[in-house]
Image (tube, rainbow, N blue to C red):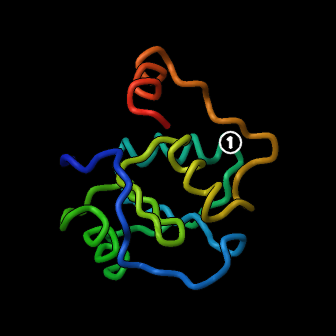
Amino acid sequence: MHDDVTGTERDAEVRHDAPAEDQEIVVFWRPACGFCSRLLRRLDGAGVPHRLVNIWEDPEGAATVRSVAGGNETVPTVVIGPVGLVNPGLHEVLAAAGQHAPGAVPQGYEPPEPGRVGSWITRTLGG
């Protein structure tokens, strides 16, 4: 079951003091999760290094997910340094990695151009 934090960025309680270039992408997942499978296929396809934590086998991992996802165990949850992402897409992960784990961003990666709605939001709200 997914909640209203899907696709949003949250501050994780997990804090890392390591420099950005030393940060890693940690993907919290569980078996039989279609959303997890989709994100993992995209990360693998783009050649993005990441570490997997199965929340059904790792109680500390499950606690981290709950701290990021408002008390829920919504997966996939991705933590990159001080940033927690709940059910993110590939480009959200890479945007956060660009700031907190630049070594994990594939060489030559360019974020997609926003569509019509995204362009309108950027023009309207600034950014």
Nearest the viewer among 47 and 119 is 119
Q: Indicate the quadrant where residue 113 lies.
A: top right
- Residue at left offset 72%, top offset 70%: 21
Q: Amino acid at mark 1?
A: Ala
Residue furthest bottom as drawn? 17
Q: Which residue is the site of mark 1?
A: 46
- Residue at left offset 61%, top offset 57%: 97
Reply above or below: 85 against 91: below
Q: Indicate the quadrant where residue 75 lies.
A: bottom left
- Residue at left offset 55%, top offset 55%: 96
In the picture, measured across the screen, residue 122 lies left or right of residue 35, that is right
Nearest the viewer among 106 and 42 is 106
In the picture, measured across the screen, residue 103 lies left or right of residue 44, that is right
In the picture, measured across the screen, residue 1 lies left or right of residue 104, that is left
Reply above or below: 95 against 26: above
Q: Is residue 1 visible?
A: no
Reply above or below: 16 against 120: below
Disc tally is 1
Nearest the viewer among 8 and 90 is 8
Mark 1 packing: few (<14 Cα in 10 Å), some, or many (20+)?
Answer: few
**Residue 54 spot, x, y in % from top left:** 41, 67
Residue furthest top as drawn? 116
Q: Secondary structure at mark 1?
A: helix
- Residue at left offset 47%, top offset 71%: 82
**Residue 105 spot, x, y in % from top left:** 70, 52
Q: Is residue 17 visible?
A: yes
**Residue 29 spot, x, y in % from top left:** 40, 59
**Residue 3 spot, x, y in % from top left:** 18, 48
